[in-house]
């Protein structure tokens, strides 16, 4: 089985920045898409951003939730070993547990559907407060 490991979550003040990272424990695993979700207390998981992580065709290489467009950036390293989420201009409403997800489904307009991903990390906590 594949384990995804997230890192980078921390307490931060409003307006601050964080960089989250996600790496698969099995280095031969090659998902076709990965995504970041978040879950605030009492709420369900919300898709934050998705990225195409293989050479397979996809119409759009990135997707973002409207609430984070212009503030968050999803990316992967040159060797495709790690996927990142850069969080800028953080707001209190960004406070949540952030989860990394990976799957064989190609990135599509339905990237935000949880069931499209087979593997999930344990989460990393982002807390934005004064």
Image (spheres, grey):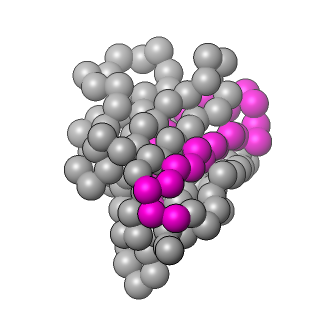
Q: From what the image shows, is residue 64 above or below residue 78?
A: below
Q: Position of residue 101 (x, y in %)?
A: 53, 49
Q: Residue at x 75, y 30 (%)?
A: 27
In which quarter of the view is residue 15 placed?
A: bottom left
Q: Position of residue 54 (x, y in %)?
A: 50, 21
**In the foreground, 105 or 59:** 59
Q: From what the image shows, is residue 25 above or below residue 54?
A: below
Q: Report the side of 99 relative to 107 (left or right).
A: right
- Residue 67 part of the magenta-drawn span: no
Q: From what the image shows, is residue 18 above or below residue 107?
A: below
Q: Report the side of 108 relative to 128 (left or right).
A: left
* Residue sitting farthest toward the bottom: 42
Q: Report the side of 115 relative to 27 (left or right).
A: left
- Residue 26 part of the magenta-drawn span: yes
**In the foreground, 10 or 46:** 10
Q: Is residue 105 visible?
A: no
In which quarter of the view is residue 58 placed?
A: top left
Total labels: the figure holds: 0
Q: Position of residue 38 (x, y in %)?
A: 45, 62
**In the foreground, 70 or 37:** 70
Q: Position of residue 30 (x, y in %)?
A: 61, 28
Q: Is residue 12 visible?
A: yes
In which quarter of the view is residue 57 placed?
A: top left
Q: Residue at x 37, y 69 (%)?
A: 93
Q: Residue at x 56, y 38 (%)?
A: 84
Q: Report the side of 116 relative to 9 (left or right).
A: left
**In the foreground, 115 or 101:** 101
The magenta span reads 13-39
């Amino acid at each position: 089985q594949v384990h995804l490991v997230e890192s980078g979550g921390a307490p931060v003040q409003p307006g601050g920045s964080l960089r989250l990272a996600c790496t698969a424990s099995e280095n031969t695993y090659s998902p076709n898409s990965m995504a970041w979700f978040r879950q605030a207390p009492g709420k369900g998981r919300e898709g934050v951003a998705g990225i195409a992580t293989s050479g397979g065709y996809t119409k759009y290489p990135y997707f973002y939730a409207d609430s984070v467009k212009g503030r968050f950036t999803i990316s992967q390293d040159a060797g495709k070993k790690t996927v990142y989420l850069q969080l800028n201009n953080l707001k209190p409403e960004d406070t949540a547990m952030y989860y990394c997800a990976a799957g064989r489904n190609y990135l599509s307009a339905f990237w935000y559907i949880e069931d499209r991903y087979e593997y999930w990390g344990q989460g990393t906590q982002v807390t934005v407060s004064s």
